[in-house]
Image (cartoon, grey):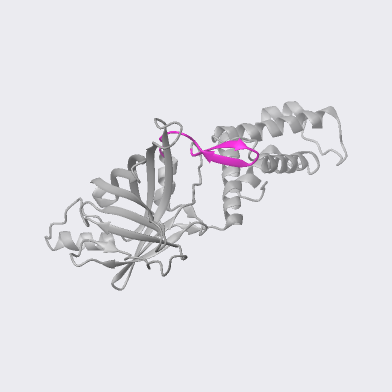
């Protein structure tokens, strides 16, 4: 629809400003900031999310997805302990493959998401979700959020004001601000200043993205398994030379074979799977269970079923062999 409108304007000779922003659709939002309240205020940090904007009559629905998943997670997270992971410290930027993933549409989960319905302002360039309800009594504590957009269509400013308090106490208030300073890529990329309560300050980058896919916890695990398989394919799961050196000739061994050849081959297979994971910027310890399962299946295919290395590679590439 957006391309059609632009083409129609050109055909009719109507000038369309390159900086005009059409909000409807999905956007990937990346923030780089310094936290003055932290023990390392000079350190750069990052956060990201997906925003969607959808017109519904004379209202605008703004949804924020706080949990975002890439097909390629390199550089975003690091293992801290057990199976837990944390954002890497620094001003992380997506690589070419990750930017392509943004354009195609990322995976999000409804956990932690928020939605507000905004009404248009009288000036025609602003939107607001309105004021929340006031506290009804001294013992009633309320929390409200007001989301606003101003400065459309040339330099939008996105603000999130939150307040918590009661009729008998002073309220605690906060504000998160995304102020656009430049519009690029014919309105498909916004950059500007980010400010959270005056303590978290930095920059934001907002990129138009493809439609997101909503994933549950099992879906996210499936995406991780897919990323593991892709890492194995791109890096070369096992080389024919290494396997041949380990098991001698491709012969079918008994299921209970426990010779030195099989032990050596098992070590080679696992090492190659781990190396493939490292090549994708991931910590093998985080994917230990998947690596172990995949290595065992490959071992059984090569030894017990007499499959060739080429056949094992084909099974991985077609998705028939999974951790």
**Which of the two residues, 267 or 182, is positioned nearer the viewer here?**
182
Asked whether residue 264 is in view, the answer is: yes
**Residue at screen point 81% across, 29% down:** 261
Residue at the outermost bottom position: 57
**Residue at screen point 38% across, 48% down:** 29
> Measured from the top left, where is residue 307 in percent x and y?
74, 42
Image check: 232 left or right of 70?
Answer: right
Query: Magenta span covers which residues?
Result: 76-94
Q: Is residue 92 magenta?
A: yes
Residue at the outermost top position: 245
**Which of the two residues, 135 or 245, is positioned nearer the viewer here?**
135
Image check: 281 left or right of 160?
Answer: right
Asked whether residue 184 is in view, the answer is: no
Q: How many marks?
A: 0
> Measured from the top left, where is residue 201 in percent x and y?
34, 40
Q: Is residue 78 magenta?
A: yes
Image check: 149 left or right of 304?
Answer: left
**Residue at screen point 46% across, 66% down:** 140
């Amino acid at each position: 629809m957006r391309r059609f409108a632009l083409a129609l304007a050109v055909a009719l000779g109507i000038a369309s400003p390159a900086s005009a922003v059409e909000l409807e659709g999905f956007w990937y939002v990346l923030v780089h900031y310094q936290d003055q309240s932290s023990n390392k205020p000079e350190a750069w940090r990052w956060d990201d999310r997906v925003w969607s904007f959808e017109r519904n009559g004379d209202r605008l629905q703004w949804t924020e997805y706080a949990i975002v998943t890439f097909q390629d997670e390199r550089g975003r997270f690091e293992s801290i302990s057990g199976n837990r992971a944390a954002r890497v410290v620094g001003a992380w930027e997506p690589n070419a493959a990750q930017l392509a993933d943004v354009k195609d549409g990322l995976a999000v989960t409804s956990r932690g998401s928020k939605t507000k319905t905004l009404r248009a302002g009288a000036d025609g360039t602003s939107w607001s979700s309105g004021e929340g309800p006031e506290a009804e009594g001294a013992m009633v504590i309320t929390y409200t959020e007001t989301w606003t957009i101003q400065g459309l269509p040339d330099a939008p400013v996105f603000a999130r004001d939150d307040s918590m308090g009661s009729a008998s106490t002073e309220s605690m208030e906060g504000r998160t601000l995304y102020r656009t300073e430049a519009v690029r890529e014919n309105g498909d990329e916004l950059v500007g200043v980010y400010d959270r309560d005056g303590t978290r300050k930095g920059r934001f980058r907002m990129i138009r993205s493809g439609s997101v896919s909503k994933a549950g916890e099992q879906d996210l695990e499936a995406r991780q398994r897919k990323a593991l398989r892709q890492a194995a394919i791109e890096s070369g799961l096992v080389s024919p030379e290494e396997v041949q050196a380990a098991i001698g000739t491709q012969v079918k061994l008994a299921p209970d074979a426990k010779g030195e050849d099989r032990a050596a081959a098992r070590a080679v297979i696992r090492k190659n799977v781990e190396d493939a994971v490292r090549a994708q910027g991931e910590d093998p310890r985080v994917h230990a269970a998947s690596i172990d399962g995949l290595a065992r299946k490959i071992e059984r295919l090569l030894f017990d079923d007499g499959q060739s290395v080429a056949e094992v590679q084909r099974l991985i590439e077609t998705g028939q062999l999974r951790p």
